[in-house]
Each structure stands twice: as C-alpha cells, then as structure tokens.
Amino acid sequence: MNTVPRPWLLTLAALSALATLSTNILLPSLPVIAQSLAVDEAQLTAGVLGLFLAVFALAQLIVGPLSDRMGRRPVVLGGLALFVAGSLVGAFAGTLPLLLASRVLQALGAAAASVLARAAARDRFEGTLLAALLGRIMVVMAAAPGFSPLLGGLVQAAWGWRALFAVLVLAGLALALAYGRIVGETLPTERRRHQPVGALARGYGKLLADARFLRPALATAAILGALFAFFGTAPLVLAGSFGFSALQVGLFFAATVFVVFAAGQTAPRWTARWGAPTVLRVGAALAVVGGLAMLISPAASLIGFAVSGCVFLFGMGLVSPTGTALALTPFASQAGQASALLGFLQMAAAAMLTTTAATLPGARVDALALVLAGGGLLALLSGTAKPAVTAVRAS
C-alpha cells in the first residue's frame, strides 16, 4: 500500500484506545461504585485501576508472540471476546471480587487489541507511512483519556454506573466487527513463527540487547509514562489549586486533544523532511521545556500551567509515533513480540511515573513538573543512538 486507508486507520486507532477508554470512563464514577458495593474508595481505586494496569502490562508479553504463531486475527478477535465478557460481568457485578474479575478479563482483551494494532500496522507499512499511521493512532489514544471521563460522567448521570460497562460491551462488539471486516489477517502463514517458552525469553532478551529497539523503545516508554502521570495528576492540580469542577476538568482534557492532534499531523511531515530520529529528539526537548516551564511558573498561574502542559503534550505527540516506528521498523519478522515488549515497557513506565508524581513530597504541581521534565529528559537521552538512525534509514 502507498497510502493508509481511512477505515484501516480508524479501526487500528480505536483498538489502541480501548484500554484507555475502559479505564478512564470509570474515573468519575468510582465514588458511586464504591458506595454501591459498600467498599472503601481507595481499595476500589487500587483494584480497578492498579490490577487492570498490571494485568494489561504482563498480558502484552504473551499476546504478541501468540499472534506471531497463530496470526493476528484470531488473537484480536479472541481478545475482544474476553473484553466483552469482562464488560458483561462488570455490568452485573454485585461484589468487589466479581468486579475485579471483570477488570482482569477486560485487561487481557484490551492488551490483545492494543499490541496487535501496532503489529498489524507494522505488518503492512514501514518508513514514513508507518510513522504517519502511528502518529494518527496516537491522536486517538490521546483523545481517549481526554474525552472518556466526560463521556463516563454523562453516562453515569443519565443511567447509572452499570451503564458504563454496557457502553464497553458495545465498543468491544463494534471493534470486533470492524476488525473482522476491514483489517482481517495481516500476517501471512509463511511469516508466522512458533517459539517455545525458552526461545520467547531469548527473543525478548535479544530485543532488549539491540540498541535499534531498546533506545527508541525507552524513549517512547518514558514519554508515555510522563503522559499517564499528567492525566493522573493534573486533575488534582486543577481541582485543588484552581477550583475546577469535574466538568471543567473534563473540558480541560478535551481541549488538550487538539494539541496532540496538531503534533500527530506534524510528526509525519517533519519525519519525511528531517528523519524520525531528529523529530524524536525535538519532541523530547519540547517535553523537557514544558516540564521546566511548569516548574518555574507561578503556582497560582492557570495560564502558565496550561501553556507549559500544552508544550509537553506537543512534544509527546512528536516522540510517541516516531519512537514507535523506530523501535518496530527493523523487526518485521517478530513484529508481534517487539510490539508486545514495547507495550510492556510503556505500561511499566506509566505505573512508575504515575506513582512518582503522586508520592513526591511538596506541591502536586511541582511533582508533576519534575516528572514531565524527567520523562522528557529520559526520552532525549534514549533517543540519541546512531544504531536506531541507521536502522530506519535503511528501511
């Protein structure tokens, strides 16, 4: 293909956004769910969010190699079936253990969707087309945390919290239908690989030892980890320091989607002109600038917080697609495994940096600023390797 078909783009982007949608749509309703199930809100939050994140991260290491052996289609559709089943369980859950079981099933299914969206993109595209597709996918991934809390709040207010799981059931069914009809199988039989457990472990070890994968993968993980920290901590800053209501917080995040959209549109053009490694470094540098600007801006300045946050988000929107393309391009023969390891690193970084932003002493805005600047700096340091440059230019 010389162009990326729009139905392809929309389907893969939606698959990539499923995990974020299934988590963030619940956030406004957590107090109501805790009251309904008669459990502590902190305990519920740790289970609903933390358990999902842990299962999601680990499952990616399994579904990628499994799809390299069986093909993408059966693993994606099987994962979406698990996701729908988990959403149905959640809709009728009357106890916390049953709700957590539903989240485990959702995480397993969402992991298959997210990992294999990237793998399917790598199966069919490379170079600037791959970067363009991943950039547009990144826009949707950023839109999901921006809009899903707003959607969740509206649905909960109209029909109650159980209706949120009904929405996720419909989303899973729609994605299964779209994937089956639009994308289908992207890995031909002759390119499939069967690996025993020992070989899988060695494959992951080789990827981690290969600078062509590791450096852009770490850059992408660092920047997305900082993004998760931003989405997790910024609501506390907006509500605590600036008196935002829940609706205003939702509208703030919805507005930031346009910044990421602009970056997603810019990244492929700049990549075609200057190369992916240069764009990655520029984006990482902007992320550092955004974090430092947030740190030195007056604590009471909403404009300073918003502008510095937008600078970080624009830089993140440049790093994510270009870093992903750099990491996956040299590994066509093991795209599923490489995509799985990349996803695992991203979720591990998200857990670490989100926890760091929440537990650092001092004002929340200062802790967030340090994490944003630190994530950008790690991405900048990781993305300077010449082996990654050589690999992508060769493609």
Image: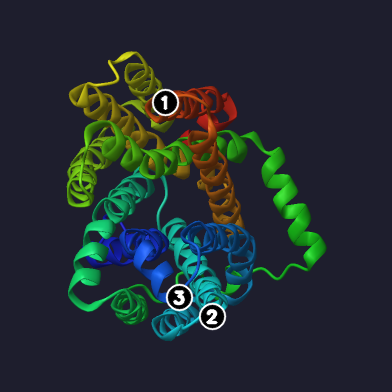
Q: Which residue is mark 2?
A: 98
Q: Are marks 1 and 2 in contact (CB under 8 Å)?
A: no
Q: Is residue 229 above or below residue 194?
A: above
Left or right, residue 196 beside residue 53: right
Query: Where residue 193 sits in the image (x, y, percent)?
Result: 66, 68
Q: Is residue 170 above or below residue 153?
A: below
* Residue type highlighted by circle 1: Ala
* SS type, badge 3: helix
* Residue type highlighted by circle 2: Leu
Please identify the quarter of the rendering in which residue 164 is found: bottom left
Q: Residue at x 52, y 48 (%)?
A: 328
Left or right, residue 274 beside residue 49: left
Which residue ends up furthest to the right in the rendered image?
A: 198
* Residue type highlighted by circle 3: Leu
Q: Which residue is mark 3?
A: 37
Q: Nearer the viewer, residue 316 or 152?
A: 152
Q: Nearer the viewer, residue 132 or 142?
A: 142
Is residue 395 in sight in this rendering? no
